[in-house]
Amino acid sequence: MSDAAQTPNAKFKPRIFSGIQPSGNLTLGNYLGALKRFAQKQDEGIETIYCLVDLHAITVWQEPEALKRQTREAAAAFIAAGIDPARSILFNQSQVSAHAELAWLLNCVARIGWMYRMTQFKDKTSGKNAENSSLGLLAYPSLMAADILLYHATMVPVGEDQKQHLELTRDIAAKFNHDYKTDFFPSPEPLIEGAATRVMSLRDGSKKMSKSDPSDASRINLTDSADTIAKKFRKAVTDPAPLPETLDGLAERPEARNLVNIYAALADKTVEDVIAEYGGQGWGVFKPALADLAVDKLAPISTEMARLMNDPAEIDRILGQGAAKADEIAQPILAKTLDIMGMVRSR
Ligand code: AMP
Ligand code: TRP
C-alpha cells in the first residue's frame, strides 16, 4: 500500500512535523537523533512544527505531577537545543484537541492487524503482557499518523526506530485517499539522516539508548553533570582492540561503532574523518576525547534548560502560544476530514 503515487505530494507545501514523548529524561540519543536535527531543519528555513506528545506518553502509566514536570522539561530542552518558538511551532499535543479527534477518525480507517505488526508494540508487550496493556498502546501509531496528517506535513525527521510507524502513516493516508476517492492527505517522508540515527546503549551495543532503560549508566541524560558524563563514557562497554584504521574495521564491533558515531555526530564530522583522526589509538585516548567533546556540546544545553526551568510560567506561555498557532493550521484540516467522511457540519 505504501504507494506514493496514490498520494502525490506536489500539491502540498514543504512542512516538517515531529514529536517526542515527555516520558522522562531526554537522552543523548534524543538529542542527536532528534533535537539537534530539528533545530537544523528550522535553520534551513522550512516550516517546522514540533510537538511534545503527552497523549502518547500516557499509553503507559505516568505519574500526573511527573508528567507535567517532564513536559515542561522537554520544552526547555527543545529551546535549549536551538528551537526558537518564534520560528518553529512548539506545543504539547493535548492542548490541541484535534489530535485526539483525527486519531479517532483514523482508527476507523486503519486495520487492527497493522497495529499488531508494529515491532515497537511487540517489544513493549512481549508475549503475554499484550492482553493487559492499554488499548491506547495498540492504537499509538494511529495517533502518530493523526499528529502528522493533521498538518499535512510532508517530512518527518525521526530516528531509525520510527521508520515503521512512518510507513504505517503512509499506509493510513493512502487507504483514506483510496476509500474516500480523494487526494486530501500527503504521503509524508521520513527523514532519517546523519551518523546518529540510532545511538546505542553504553552498556550493550545491541540495544538502543533509551530513557526507559533501567540502567542509568546505559545512557547520557541531557541533565547529567560533566563528571557523570565523563564517568559514563569511561565505563562504556567496548572490546579491547584499538580503534580500526578503516571504516570496514568497525563492521563487527557495535560498541566501537556506536562511540565513533556519537563522536562524529557531536563534532559534525563524518565517521571517516573520526577514523582518520583516531584510527590505531586505544580507548584510553578516545574515551576522554569523546567525554570532553560531549561535555563541551551538552553543558550549555543543560545550563540553559536549568535556567528555563526556573520560570515554568514562561514555558507554559510558550506552549500555549504554540498550541494556538498549531490549532489554526489543524482546525480546517480536521473540518475537511470530517466533511469528506460524511459528518454533517452545521455550526
Ligand atoms: P522517544 O524518546 O521515543 O519519544 O523518541 C523521540 C525521538 O528521538 C524520535 O525521533 C526517536 O527516533 C529519537 N530517538 C530516541 N532514541 C534514540 C536513539 N537512541 N538514537 C537515535 N534517535 C533516538
Ligand atoms: N512515536 C514517536 C517516538 O516515540 C513520537 C511521536 C509521536 C512522533 N508522534 C509523532 C514522531 C509524530 C514523529 C511524528 O519517538
Image (tube, rainbow, N blue to C red):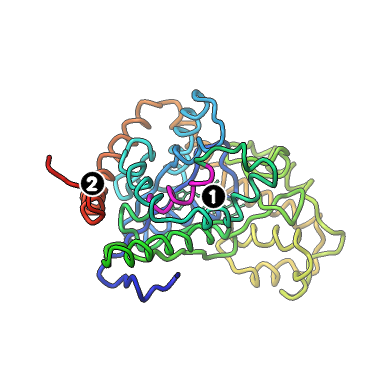
Instruction: Give the image location of residue 225, x and y in percent.
Output: 64, 36
Q: Which residues are magenta?
A: 137-147
Looking at mark 1, is its residue's CB closer than 8 Å to ligand 1? Answer: no
Q: Is residue 317 above or below residue 330?
A: above
Q: Which of these two is toward me, 79 or 54?
A: 54
Q: Is residue 98 magenta?
A: no
Q: Secondary structure at mark 2?
A: helix
Q: Is residue 62 above or below residue 206?
A: above
Question: Can you name the residue that lies furthest to the left here?
Answer: 346
Precedes in sequence: disc 1 or disc 2: 1
User: Residue 80's x, y, as percent?
Assistant: 45, 42
Q: Nearer the viewer, residue 113 or 38?
A: 113
Instruction: Quadrant for residue 9, please give it.
Output: bottom left
Q: Residue 70: which disc?
A: none
Q: Quadrant of residue 206?
A: bottom right
Residue at the farthest right position: 240
Please name the residue shown 38% across and 47% down the image. 103
Give the residue type at disc 1.
Tyr
Q: Which quarter of the image is occupied by the N terminus?
A: bottom left
- Residue at mark 2: 331
Marking on residue 31: 1
Mark 1 element type = helix
Residue closest to the eye, 223 or 204: 204
